[in-house]
Amino acid sequence: MPVTFTFGEMLSARSVIGTTLAELGEEHENLWVITPDIGATLVEFRDRFPERFLDVGLAEQVSVGIAAGLAYDGNIPVVSGMLPFLSMRALEQVRTDVCYPNLPVKIIGTHGGLVGNGGSTHYAVEDLALMCALTNMTVTSIGDPLMVGEILRQSMTMTGPIYIRLAVGKKDMVLYEPGAHEVRIGKGIVAREGADATIFTHGTTVAQALQAADALADEGRSIRVVDMFTLKPIDEELVVRCAEETGGRFVVLEDHLAYGGLASRIADVVADRGIRLTAFERLGIPQVYAGFGEDEQLRDKHGYGLAATVAALHGVLGAS
């Protein structure tokens, strides 16, 4: 099968955020950036537009509340910080101050999944379940750093809130050739075509899914890889098409709790649409506090690393 991605080039998603926001600040005079003491990569915006930049210190709830107030006044606020705290410590403010009035607040941050080796308090592993549960919230999880700028640009015209999840954001793998895929909020990306099974994934595990598909290709099997970077609203038509075209064999791989994230979203589509699958496997973090370690080590330890992904694909391919 033709492969439409390139491994090797590394790029900082944080730098893309900083550069993109500085550019957007020129286009949108009502764009504000607020951070809870995580502003090292926002220096370019801060220096160009100091009157529209706020560092509130380690106070995520305050940053979200200020963003809501700015949005009420006709501005476009972006809150940039660490997602473990923006998704949980500030959850009530996100729900009540932002989602209830459906304000155009953009929440973008790092440390989605078991990345950063910060321990369980510093991993965002429940965040997608929490954000998907909120009325009016659009939820994304980005693996390719080049996509971050495009998602931010598209979000400028949104009337409601959006949550943009990244990994650590310091050294991220470029997955796609620029222009090879249409990046559109609400639509998944077929990162690799295939006919025997589909592996759905998002964020940091897209690269791993592609590696697993490579391993199966060496055995003569054709695995489709779908980067479902928008979890809400999910691309239901793509899920339906993959069920029809890849034998109803699904694997869902994600750096999030195995229940409550993308696998649960896809299971809902399957149930609601009455789709008959041949096999369905979910790979993610079990109901444990994961502890310390590098992200690849933790994935292996908790059963959703590369070897486990290959094994899950073998399992669904053997189903009848």
Image (cartoon, rainbow, N blue to C red):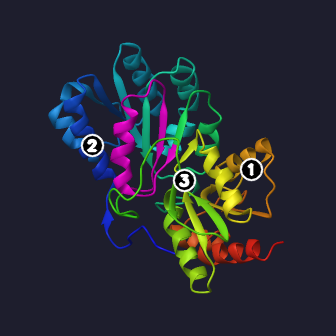
Which quadrant of the view contains residue 155? top left
Q: Residue furthest right?
A: 320
Instruction: State left or right for residue 301 relative to residue 156.
Output: right
Residue under the point 33% across and 20% down: 75
Indicate the amino acid at tag 2. Thr
Rendered location of residue 50, percent (x, y):
19, 29
As displayed, is residue 8 above or below residue 218? above
What residue is shown with label 1? 267
Instruction: State left or right for residue 145 relative to residue 246.
Output: left
Which mark is first along the chain, 2 or 3? 2
What residue is shown with label 2? 20
Q: Which residues are magenta?
A: 140-169
Give the class, few, some or many, for how many residues have Cα within 10 Å of label 2's Cα (few <14, many ≥20).
Answer: some
Rendered location of residue 310, percent (x, y):
64, 77
Q: Is residue 36 visible?
A: no
Quadrant where the image shows the C terminus: bottom right
Pick the front one: 177 or 169:
177
Which mark is first along the chain, 2 or 1? 2
Instruction: State left or right for residue 173 relative to residue 265.
Output: left
Which quadrant of the view contains residue 180? bottom left
Count of numbered circles on the image: 3
Q: Which mark is residue 123?
A: 3
As displayed, is residue 54 above or below residue 318? above
Element marked by disc 1: helix
Q: CA distance from mark 3 to mark 1?
A: 25 Å
